[in-house]
Amino acid sequence: MNAGLLPPLADPSDLQTRPLVLVVDRSPDRRLFLQTSLGGRCRVATASTGREGAMHLRRHSPRALVAGRASGRAAREVLPAVLQGPEAPATLTLWATQPSPEWADAALRHPFTRADLLRAVAHLLSGGTSSPENQQAGPDASPDWSPPRR
């Protein structure tokens, strides 16, 4: 009945040309927020643990990694080990109180908005090595002064 009035949600041929971004976070709600926020601009794969994220990194070569909170010591050890070398994706960490890890290219401090997230990921995908606007997110956030990995 509405044929031709509404554009398709996504052009299937366009989906294959979008960059692949891997989201790793232990919270299903945060993964869903990140996936829906980035889904209009990227292909998004998700993982709930560092180990699962590392397996995905080895198999699929995403262009960027958005790392939220992953549980346990394994997450802190497995992801950095996979992120070594020239083929490693640009990495954005999402964190609240701790300094950005040395293996991350950029960080967003909570609170951050969807616009902050999109801007930071777009910057990484374009070849940037730190978040735009001095890595500051949200009106009350302070900058991440961690050095970039590359």
Image (cartoon, rainbow, N blue to C red):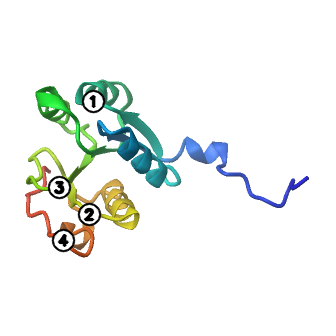
* Three-letter residue code for mark 4: Asn
Residue 128 seen: yes
* Three-letter residue code for mark 2: Pro
* Residue 102 picture location, percent across and down: 8, 47
- In-image side of 92 versus 8 (left or right): left
* Residue at screen point 17% across, 48% down: 104
* Residue 21 picture location, percent across and down: 39, 43
Calculate the distance from the C-alpha at mark 4 to the C-alpha at mark 3: 17 Å
- Give the class, few, some or many, for how many residues have Cα within 10 Å of label 3's Cα (few <14, many ≥20): some
- In-image side of 10 versus 16 (left or right): right
Q: Which of marks 2 and 1 is in front?
A: 2
Secondary structure at badge 1 equals loop
* Three-letter residue code for mark 1: Thr
Image height check: is 113 above or below 140?
Answer: above
The residue pinned by badge 2 equals 111
The residue pinned by badge 4 equals 134
- Going from N to C along the chain, the mark reached first, 3 or 1, is 1
- Going from N to C along the chain, the mark reached first, 4 or 1, is 1
- Going from N to C along the chain, the mark reached first, 3 or 2, is 3
- Going from N to C along the chain, the mark reached first, 2 or 4, is 2
- Going from N to C along the chain, the mark reached first, 2 or 1, is 1
- Give the class, few, some or many, for how many residues have Cα within 10 Å of label 4's Cα (few <14, many ≥20): few
* Three-letter residue code for mark 3: Ala
* Residue at screen point 26% across, 37% down: 87
* Residue at screen point 12% across, 50% down: 149
